[in-house]
Amino acid sequence: MVKAKDLTDQEYLYGHKACPGCGLGTIGRLALKILGERTIVALPASCMSTVTTIYPQMNYSVPSLTMAFAGTAALLTGMSAGLKAQGITDAYVLGMAGDGGTADIGLQALSGAVERGDDFIYICYDNEAYMNTGVQRSSLTPIGAHTTNSPAGTASYGKEKAKKNLFEIMIAHRIPYAATASSAYPYDFMNKMEKTKRIKGPKFIHIMCPCPTGWGFASDLTVEIGKLAVETGLWYLAEYENGKVKMNVVPKNLKPVEEYLKKQRRFRHLTAENIQMVQEHRDSEWRLIREKWLSSLKS
Amino acid sequence: MNNNPKDGNLDFLNGDEAVAYGARLCRPQVIAVYPITPQTIVVEKISEFVANNEMTCEYIHVESEHSAMCAAMGASLVGARAFTATSSQGLAYMHEMLHYVSGSRFPIVMMNANRTLAAPWNIFGDQRDSLSQRDTGWIQAYVENGQEALDMIIQAYAIAEDDRVYTPVMVNLDGFVNTHTFELVHIPAQEEVDAFLPPFKSRNAVDFHHPRSFCMTASTEWNMEFRYQQQEAMDRARGVIAEVDKGFGDRFGRYYGGMVEEIRCEDAEVVLVGMGSVVGTSRIVVDRLREKGFKVGLVKLRFYRPFPREYFKGLSRRVKAMGVIDRDISFGYEGAVASDIKSALAGAGAVPKVINFIAGIAGRDITKENIEGMYDKLFNFARGKDEKEMQFIGLRW
């Protein structure tokens, strides 16, 4: 288990320009503290690249590269192959891409790289919309969220489709290691990062990254919002390893989704009926989770 | 040929196979390719080399051409020599990545099997695919036959990885006419190629002790300077191309002329300019017409980027009319090669008449008769007869 006192004092990501309260800087910083200096970071067009790699103010003290939106995983493949070809076995290649760069435009490259079994670590930091371009919906934007291209209006309650389940898409690939995480649960995340160091082949972590700017909450509420997402069951912390899913946190009783929704501007427009719909959607997802992954615990 | 292993050996190969042998001789450490007709044989042949331990490299079965170029870039980033190959739709699909690779100065070499672009859909050859990638910042070479294809893959690495250049190179073969035609090809000995092309020591690779950011965002305050450096590298590449051609010829006995090869242009009144396989056919026509006493010449344009502007300026002072064969067209204007040649002539003083022949689109044959007809028109034009400045050759109507 990772302990704070054991973490290196060395900072590998600092001086970035992320919005106040953004979970992104924490994610990159902690991930690199776990992996160390022999790590190469790849970033597609995204918040992460925009706030960390604007010449000449480079914010990584490890090698990094900014990548075409669709190509993060394929780039990781090439880096991994290039290191292997030169006999370099003690370095990590780490991709950090947003929800759009992973679940939308980057999904083909990710699927290809995971199928090939290439050796890399991929973090999808999920702020649930195209935040860098000004809050447009992605396939990971949750149902009911207002975005600038799925606005709430007289004929719409915001995004009308549910969030795509990336974790299960990775499981369908029989990936060696996949996990979900949250920037509000740093130890859980760091322990998962620690595991990725010991596993050969593709490793995938889907981490929720609450976004004060895009979601509409005060910048000191990032952790609270992240925790509420898990406590209401709208996000879950899980791992897939050796063909099995383990739920890391199972709330005894899920809090009403309203407690999470009402704290954010993007859900402000939802009616009681809309909120009921979100809750029902959550309940149906949790029925599936209990059937698939928690049934052995019950019996 | 004697049995000295230093001399390599002769084999009966098609153009794709020649490319595969050329790539093998360069010892790329990472190959990322996606199959597409008519490049497929390159993919297959390299797969066989790897499966039979005749080639040691990381061979990546990417799921698209976009990913092929991403993976090649990743490999180059960590200091590995990378190779890829594509064609047509595949080249179009990796378009975005061509800019990334050249802008970040990764000296990757790619073979492109020239094939037309849909729609209407067709798998046969023309050069619309690569010419429409003109502004992606890649050096573009066009070869005439299988031997030149093999030799150019080797030269391409020497050019791309030269300190003065650090720019990726695309080696173009006409689809089917080059890629699938069997010829006797000399395969140089590995030791000779090793001596010509030393192992890749990238100056543009990650170093854990001196971490740098690559491909980063460069703001308005800085971006233009990066572009200026790309242009300077391309300008320097002209000289490097000539040097590499000379060095290659000295070692292997085959000289190609660098940027251009002139064929019987000494006292020519009219010349044709072409790229790729059409040059082979045109050579025969030129010889035939010369025998009949016609003062015709032929220019094989070997590199489209960088473009040999000064050469064409000089040539223009020696001839009365020039024909440019374009296996492509920029709709609404004319063929891309013709445009560039005319642009080069603009500052040359007395400019000869130029006819742009659009021919060989989507694999249509450019016959010897077609080429003779082009020379006829050039003579007529030179003598003051009216000719359309741009014409399609071999149309059904």
Image (cartoon, rainbow, N blue to C red):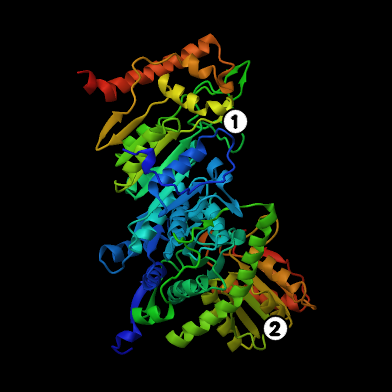
Task: Left or right? Give the position of B295 relative to B206.
Answer: right
Q: Which one is nearer the viewer's eye here, A94 or B325?
A: A94
Residue A243's place in the image compared with B191, above or below, is above
Q: In which quarter of the image is residue B296?
A: bottom right
On the image, numbered disc 1 is attached to which residue? A213
Please state which amino acid type lies under the numbered disc 1: Thr
Q: Which one is nearer the viewer's eye here, A2 or B191?
A: A2
Specify the subunit that label 2 lies on.
B
SS class, disc 1: helix
Expressed as whole percent of the image width and height from the top left, the position of residue B68 reads 44, 55
Q: Which one is nearer the viewer's eye here, A268 or A51?
A: A51
Residue at the spot 69% in from the left edge and 52% down from the top edge: B220
Residue B177's place in the image compared with B66, above or below, is below
Please state which amino acid type lies under the numbered disc 2: Glu
Expressed as whole percent of the image width and height from the top left, the position of residue B267 reads 67, 88
* Real-space Cα separation, disc 1 to disc 2, in angstroms: 71 Å
On the image, numbered disc 2 is attached to which residue? B269
